[in-house]
Image (spheres, rainbow, N blue to C red):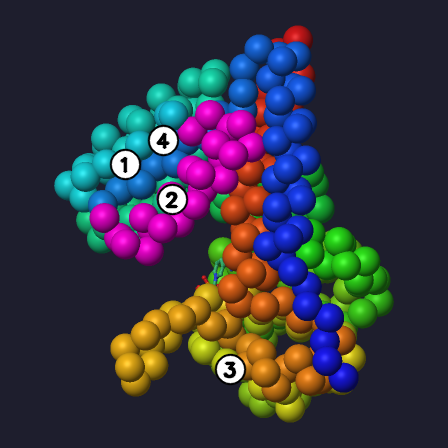
Amino acid sequence: MTAQILDGKALAERLQQSMAEEVQHLCAKYGRPPGLAVIWVGDNPASAAYVGNKDRAGRRVGIDTSRSQHLGAETTQAELLDLIDALNADPAVDGILVQLPVPQHLDGDSLLNRIDPDKDVDGLHPANLGRLVRGEAGLRSCTPAGVMAILADAQIELAGKIAVVVGRSILVGKPMALLLLEKNATVITAHSRTRNLAEMTRQADVLVAAVGRPNLITGEMIRPGSVVIDVGMNRITNTEGKSRLVGDVDFESAQQVASAITPVPGGVGPMTVTMLLANTLQSYKVRVQSAR
Ligand SMILES: NC(=O)c1ccc[n+]([C@@H]2O[C@H](COP(=O)([O-])OP(=O)(O)OC[C@H]3O[C@@H](n4cnc5c(N)ncnc54)[C@H](OP(=O)(O)O)[C@@H]3O)[C@@H](O)[C@H]2O)c1
């Protein structure tokens, strides 16, 4: 068996195209575009790439990103809290995100917690995570939401299926498990203390790997015919010094066993940014429609 490739890049392009059309229509109706402010502190090179992607994708769909700020590494916690307060109060801003990681002298959690939950387009504020736990509407974490969009687009039924999520971070694993549970999957969460990981993963109808260990999940750990979603993004360097991005799943062996699989790159990554834009649009719609 060779697995169907779940092409997150193509899906992201389609969704961004339809968002661009919707933004154009809504902007004409309500007189302003959605606004997204990304706060980036310091010069972490990985963050530079992520922030650049978000900004380009935002502008492509017609989102105003002009309130975004790149601040020096010496910026203080108090200055950042003031900035977040100003963005919370700014009627042209629908989404705020603090690019992580922040420099060590800053407290990332208290910055995230200062963001108005209704503008928390990363879905990481405790209020939004709490809404997810309670099954209430709210802004969902972008990467798990992107995974759900890939599964929905491929019409993969989740009710009654066994879903195994490897990883339990607050960024990916935990909200991922809750979103799968919301769709009535029976969810197992595995982590670094899980005994006999392969025994767990082999039960999965849907396997989500969000670990950060290159090629941890091999073909023999996968149940034949299962759906495999690889969230991992690991940069590895070969003996000639060339670097490339690989997932947590050994793609070559896994695609012989799975019925469907996301590639890395081109799988979950592009959907994360797309869900950030979708969250910004969702927040904007609530704001402009309630202002009428
Ligand atoms: N595609 C995207 O857009 C996107 C977005 C976010 C993250 N990522 C990628 O996704 C991966 C995970 O990110 P993260 O932020 O969730 O990482 P993280 O915070 O480091 O969490 C990793 C999780 O994996 C678990 N783990 C570590 N080693 C394990 C092992 N040998 N067996 C089973 N579980 C193990 C850890 O367990 P403990 O809790 O027990 O320590 C932890 O829960 C990374 O590669 C990251 O780059 C991709």
Q: Earlier in the sequence, mark 4 or mark 3?
A: 4
Residue 98 x %, y %: 38, 41
Q: Are marks 4 and 1 in contact (CB under 8 Å)?
A: yes
Gap between marks 1 and 3 measured at Cα: 35 Å
Q: As rendered, which of 190 and 214 lies closer to the eye?
A: 214
| Horizontal side of residue 84 vs 215, given as left or right | left
Q: Position of residue 115 (x, y in %)?
A: 43, 33
Q: Earlier in the sequence, mark 1 or mark 2?
A: 2
Distance of mark 1 from mark 2, alpha carbons?
9 Å
Place residue 275 in its image quadrant: top right
Q: Which residue is mark 4?
A: 68
Judge from the rendering whether residue 272 lies leftward or rightward of residue 36; answer left or right.
right
Q: Looking at the picture, does residue 200 appear above or below residue 96? A: below
Image position of 114 with respect to 265: above or below: above
Of tags 3 and 2, the one toward the viewer is 2
CB of mark 2 within 8 Å of CB of mark 4?
yes
Is residue 44 in view?
Answer: yes
- Report the quarter where the N terminus lies: bottom right
State how many labels appear.
4
Judged from the image, the secondary structure of the residue bearing numbered disc 3 is loop
Earlier-in-chain disc, 1 versus 3: 1
Amino acid residing under circle 3: Leu
| Mark toward the start of the polypeptide (2 vs 4) | 2
Residue 64 within the segment the image draws in magenta: yes
- Amino acid at the residue labelled 1: His
Q: Which residue: 83% across, 62% down?
A: 157
**Dot 1: what SS?**
strand
Q: Which residues are magenta?
A: 43-65
Q: Is 125 or 150 nearer to us in this picture?
A: 150
Q: Is mark 3 within 8 Å of ligand 1?
A: yes
**Could you say which disc has been placed on residue 51 in the image?**
2
Question: How much space separates mark 4 and mark 3, taking CA atoms?
Answer: 37 Å
